[in-house]
Amino acid sequence: MSPRLDTDTVVVGLGAMGSQALWRLARNGVDAIGVERFSPGHDRGSSHGESRIIRTAYLEGSEYVPLVRAAWRAWDELQEAAGTELVVRTGALMLGRPESPAIAGSVTAAERHGLSYARLSPADLAERHPRHRVRHDEEGVFEEAAGVVLPERAVLAAVNEARRAGARVLTGRTVTRIEPDPDRPRVWIGDTEIRARRVIVTVGAWLTRLLPGLADLGGGIRVERRVLGWFPITDPLSASLEPVFARDEADGTLWYGFPSMDGGRTLKIGIHAEGPETRAPEGRRPGSQWGEPVDPDIGPRPPDAADARRLGALVAGLRGVAPTPERTVSCMYTMTSDEHFLIGRHDELPGLVLAGGFSGHGFKFASAVGEALADLAGEGRTDLPIGMFDPHRWDG
Ligand SMILES: Cc1cc2nc3c(=O)[nH]c(=O)nc-3n(C[C@H](O)[C@H](O)[C@H](O)COP(=O)(O)OP(=O)(O)OC[C@H]3O[C@@H](n4cnc5c(N)ncnc54)[C@H](O)[C@@H]3O)c2cc1C
């Protein structure tokens, strides 16, 4: 590689967000270079494991709904450009007590935005969604506008389409340093320098490694471990594709699962947050302290027998699923203190546009976030509703 490259925009990190940003830039005719330390679609960041939930009645806050809507539209655009399916519509079932974030937060978001949904009693659930064992004091909220995004396939599709539209993609290259500058920021890959007009930084769990000045932003950015497991299905119960689900337990544990993506053999579940937790208005889940810290250069500790047992205990809430996982994997969440994302510019990092801190719920938005990042790098502004993710929101 030549010791100096020039371009309009560099995208550092081609995971969920960076791959989408690179595609949007290239599609807009912008000269762009994407740099990825591994190969797109890899399993060492936060975007592997076959499936991600997309929901519209957003329990984490009704203010996300306009961005989810933008994301659905933007996923369709990428699917059309790539000629491949990236989102599978299954509907979503939220389960819990009426006052739980899963139920109350989803209902609030649906009511505020006029989304269609159905409230289901335990008897309704037994009839329509027999996979789920619920207690008499729990209920369900079903929405159709939900499903599964295929993460590895989505990253690869965006990178391939970016390449096809003219982007240069450097894989197996680690950005070692970024020099912010309002006119000509520089990106270093060892001794190779890339000069650009703008730099988009989408390095996921490595954000505060590359930009250590952000480590204390908003009270601190933490990288935490999470574990997923695939459990054998012993009884199909129904021939149709089941909805994705999230379940709020009485102790505050929020776990989730997917319909079988392997022809009815296994079903994947994961834990988003362990209880106990404090509750906040509108079903938001502020700063859960749970989560083993991870050094992203080492990676999350591999799953062990205790993880398998913990997941297996939750599977008791599902009919027709064996309690021992066939396989488990671990991955990383990058948490902000309020569990909302960081998207935008930071005054101390001129020439850079950031997207990080997706706090375990960012994938569904990646298509719209990529579009917003390309707008911010190009025009300096975007019409997409990302104001609440301003990295300066904690100032004063
Ligand atoms: C187990 C699990 C389950 C989840 N479930 C859901 C869900 O159901 N729905 C949902 O919406 N979200 C979900 N999420 C969250 C979502 O997957 C993440 O928010 C999202 O993938 C984060 O994307 P990212 O681009 O910030 O990070 P990543 O996709 O990890 O991308 C960062 C990239 O930057 C690269 N990189 C890092 N440093 C450098 C460097 N110095 N030079 C070059 N490249 C570099 C990395 O290799 C990586 O490819 C889940 C996350 C996990 C871990």
Image (cartoon, grey):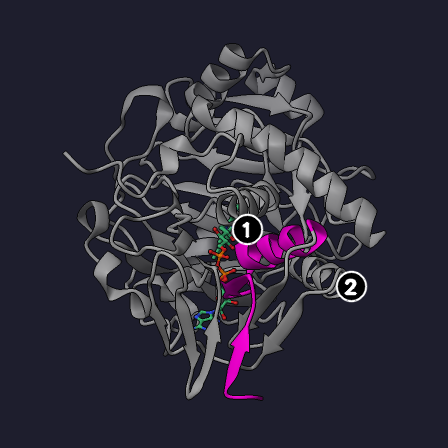
Q: Residues within 10 Å of mark 2 (few under 14, many from 20)?
A: few
Q: Is residue 174 left or right of residue 287?
A: right
Residue plotted at (37% across, 32% down): 388
The x, y position of residue 330, in whole percent, is: 46, 66
The x, y position of residue 134, in whole percent, is: 52, 29
Circle 2 residue: 164
**Mark 2: which amino acid?**
Arg
The x, y position of residue 368, in whole percent, is: 58, 40
Q: Is residue 339 left or right of residue 107?
A: left
**Mark 1: which amino acid?**
Ile
Q: Quick one: SS at disc 1?
A: strand
Q: Residue furthest right?
A: 83
Asked whether residue 355 appears in the rendered view, the answer is yes
- Asked whether 219 or 189 is in front, the reply is 189
User: What is the distance, in whole Å, between disc 2 and disc 1 at their CAs?
Assistant: 35 Å
The x, y position of residue 101, in whole percent, is: 39, 27
Circle 1 residue: 269
Q: For the magenta stretch, what is the residue range?
A: 1-28
Q: Which image quadrant is residue 6 in?
A: bottom right
